[in-house]
Image: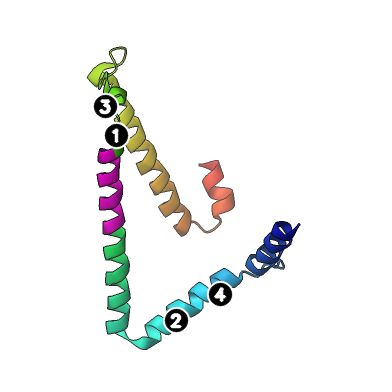
């Protein structure tokens, strides 16, 4: 019963309703205060998060190599698809991503994206 009341309290704090988002307010407030602090502080925060981002990517890559199981790599290229199938899948994924990105960019410029993008 104690866990449920804590969960309800947390959900009330995070989403009290009425279209109000305290988390968005806190992020906006922090951004404004950071910008008011000046370019040097903003640069330091950007550098910190960029370094953290790159460090996490290296950590994930290193741990994936350490924890990888060799038996899952055989066969490396599935015989039923071959290298051609791998390239076709990569091409489909790439063009799907580019298409979705294009839709997102265009919807930002449309006068009525809810109506116009769904028609396209």
Q: Is residue 40 above or below residue 4?
A: below
Which residue is found at the position 33% from the left and 27% from the top? 89
Point out the frontmost of discs 1 and 2: 1
Q: Is residue 116 above or below residue 5?
A: above
Which residue is found at the position 63% from the left and 66% from the top? 14
Q: Is residue 32 left or right of residue 55?
A: right
How busy is the neighbourhood of tag 3: few (under 14 within 10 Å), some, or many (20 plus)? few
Q: In terms of sequence position, does the residue under pointer 4 or pointer 3 come before the other?
A: 4
Q: Is residue 20 above or below residue 76?
A: below
Element type at marker 2?
Answer: helix
Q: In terms of sequence position, does the residue under pointer 3 or pointer 2 come before the other?
A: 2
Q: Which residue is identified by label 3?
A: 70
Which residue is found at the position 73% from the left and 60% from the top? 2
Q: In terms of sequence position, does the residue under pointer 4 or pointer 2 come before the other?
A: 4
Q: Is residue 35 left or right of residue 63?
A: right
Q: In terms of sequence position, does the residue under pointer 4 or pointer 1 come before the other?
A: 4
Which quadrant of the figure contains the N terminus? bottom right
The front one of 96 and 77 is 77
Cβ–Cβ below 8 Å for labels 3 and 2? no
Q: CA distance from mark 4 to mark 1?
A: 42 Å
Q: Which residues are magenta?
A: 55-66
Element type at marker 4?
Answer: helix
Q: Which residue is identified by label 4?
A: 25
- Residue 8: image x %, image y %? 71, 61
Residue 35's mark? Answer: none
Assign the magenta stretch its main secondary structure. Answer: helix
Which residue is found at the position 28% from the left and 51% from the top? 59
Cβ–Cβ below 8 Å for labels 3 and 1? yes
């Amino acid at each position: 019963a104690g866990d449920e009341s804590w969960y309800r309290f947390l959900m009330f704090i995070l989403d009290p309703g009425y279209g109000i988002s305290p988390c968005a307010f806190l992020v906006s407030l922090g951004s404004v205060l950071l910008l008011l602090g000046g370019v040097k502080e903003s640069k330091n925060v950007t550098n910190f998060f960029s370094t953290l981002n790159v460090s996490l990517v290296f950590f994930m890559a290193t741990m994936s190599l350490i924890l990888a199981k060799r038996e899952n790599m055989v066969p490396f290229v599935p015989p039923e698809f071959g290298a051609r199938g791998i390239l076709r899948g990569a091409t489909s994924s790439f063009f799907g991503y580019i298409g979705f990105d294009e839709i997102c960019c265009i919807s930002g410029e449309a006068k009525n994206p809810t109506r116009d993008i769904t028609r396209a």
